[in-house]
Amino acid sequence: MLSRLQELRKEEETLLKLKAALHDQLNRLKVEELALQSMINSGRGHDEMVSSQPVAQQPEDMLVHVDNEASINQTALELSTRSHVMEEEEEEEEEESDS
């Protein structure tokens, strides 16, 4: 029974980390959505300026074409928690070494 409780605690911890990672991803998507809405609302003049900028100046994340459904569907979502968990562990180690 004790081992089952430990398993459940580990599973809970994993799920909480996954929840945090998904929440972070959701926030990033909301920011991107607001940026896209702003671009749309600003009118054609702004769109022409954006399209005339060299691609090298635009961040890779923003290279998704708003009107291209295939491009939108191919956008990769960061669902892996491994990198997120590793970043948290590194931050914790840095905090501990600073103390």
Image (spheres, helix red, strand yellow):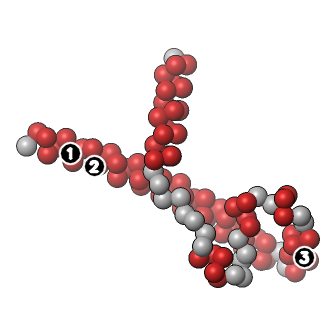
At horizontal 70% and vertical 71% (from top left) the residue drawn is 64
Q: What's the residue type where badge 2 is placed?
A: Glu
Tell whether 99 sits left or right of 74.
left
Tag 1 residue: 7
Kindly indicate the quadrant of the structure image that contains residue 62.
bottom right
Q: What's the residue type where badge 3 is placed?
A: Glu
Q: What's the residue type where badge 1 is placed?
A: Glu
Tell whether 63 sits left or right of 92.
right
- Pointer 2 local density, CA inside 10 Å: few below 14, some 14–19, many at least 20: few
At horizontal 54% and vertical 26% (from top left) the residue drawn is 94
Choose between 26 and 65: the one closer to the eye.
65
- Residue 47, compared with residue 81, is above or below; it is below
Tag 2 residue: 11
- Residue 19, compared with residue 63, is above or below; it is above
What is the x, y in percent for residue 54? 89, 64
Outermost residue, left side = 1
Tag 3 residue: 48
Can the viewer see residue 48? yes
Q: Which is more N-terminal, label 1 or label 3?
A: 1
